[in-house]
Each structure stands twice: as structure tokens, then as C-alpha cells.
Amino acid sequence: MAIRRKTLIRRSGVEWTDYNCNIYRGCAHNCKYCYARLMTKRFEPKPSDWRDVKMVENAVELARRDIMALRPGRIMFCSMTDPYQPIEADRMLARKVLEVLLNSPFHVFILTKSPLVTRDWDLIRSHRNIEVSFTIASLDDIPFWEPYAPGNTKRIEALKKDRAVKEEVCECK
């Protein structure tokens, strides 16, 4: 299922990023501490199941249009959901939108719980206007408050791949 929007990149309400870019609505991780799920219930007249993930079907087109209309700044990709949740493996929407964002004067900040981001290392490492961070909120591999998210072991392995990529690109030892 998909949804349509009029804009994709929106002004942020937090000081550490200028814009938010959310390509999905809902999140399969179903984290118990998720503020986005609570916000959706608050502002949607008829809230849907948060785990019923919907993609923004016109996301690539909107990203192209939005970056032309906005003053360059820092974009958090994504702030309300994880851009690399399970549906992304088939849809590849994050990759398509990243291609647009990374070829712009904007700085992109990805926050994810998913090692799927490593699929896009070829794209990510070819640009300097990007940061990738992983949420690790517990010493447990699969914390009870992140019941459907990839475990911390998988996230740490992805971080190790990131380090290997950085060492390869920087030729650091």
C-alpha cells in the first residue's frame, strides 16, 4: 500500500537538523518507546496500525522538487520511521531518494536500526555530504522494547562494515 504527499522534505522542529525526510509511514520495528506512533495517533483522525508500513509513492519526484525549492541545510533521513525497515529490501525507495539527496547541496543524516543500510555503501561512500548512525539502546541483543528490529549484533556488524569502508576510502590503518 502507498500514500501520496504534497511535500517530502519538511522543516524540522529540532535544533540539530534543518529538515526531515520521511519516505514511509509506519514502522515494522514496533519499538515500544516510539514517539512517532504516538504522534500519529494524536494527529490522525482515524489512526492505522503503525506496523502497517506505507511508502510515499511519489517520494523520488517530491525529493527532486523539494531540494530545488529549499535552502540547503541538514536533512534527517528519516525522523519518523526507519528508512531501512524490511519493506525497503524490496522497494529500494531509500536508495532512490538518497541518490537525489546526495547529488544536491544538502547534508544527509541517516539514523537506522537496520544493517540493510550496508546495501547502499557504494552510493554512500561516493559522497561526502552524508552521515550514517545506528541506534543501539541496550546491551541486550534484541531488547524487549524493540521487538521486531534487527538485533544489536547485526547493527554492530554493520558498523564494522562501515569502518572497513572508511578505512578503504581513507586508506587509513
Image: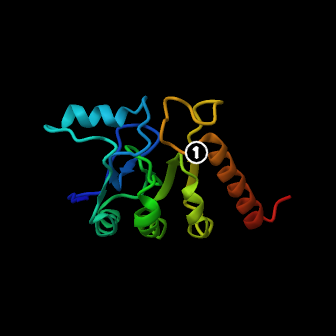
Query: Element under label 1?
Result: strand
- Residue under the image location 51 percent in, 51 percent down: 109
Outermost left residue = 45
- Residue under the image location 44 percent in, 35 percent down: 31
On-image quarter of the C terminus? bottom right
| Residue 151 in view in this figure | yes
Viewer-nearest residue: 137 or 22 = 137
Q: Is residue 98 above or below residue 150?
A: below
Q: Is residue 120 above or below residue 35?
A: below
Outermost right residue = 173
- Residue under the image location 20 percent in, 59 percent down: 6
Q: Position of residue 121 (x, y in %)?
A: 61, 65
Which residue is label 1 attached to? 134
What kind of residue is marked 1?
Phe
Q: Position of residue 90 (x, y in %)?
A: 43, 65
Q: Is residue 172 above or below residue 135?
A: below
Q: Position of residue 84 (x, y in %)?
A: 47, 54
Horizontal side, residue 100 vs residue 153: left or right: left
Q: What is the crowding at mark 1: few (fewer than 14 residues within 10 Å), some, or many (at least 20)?
A: some
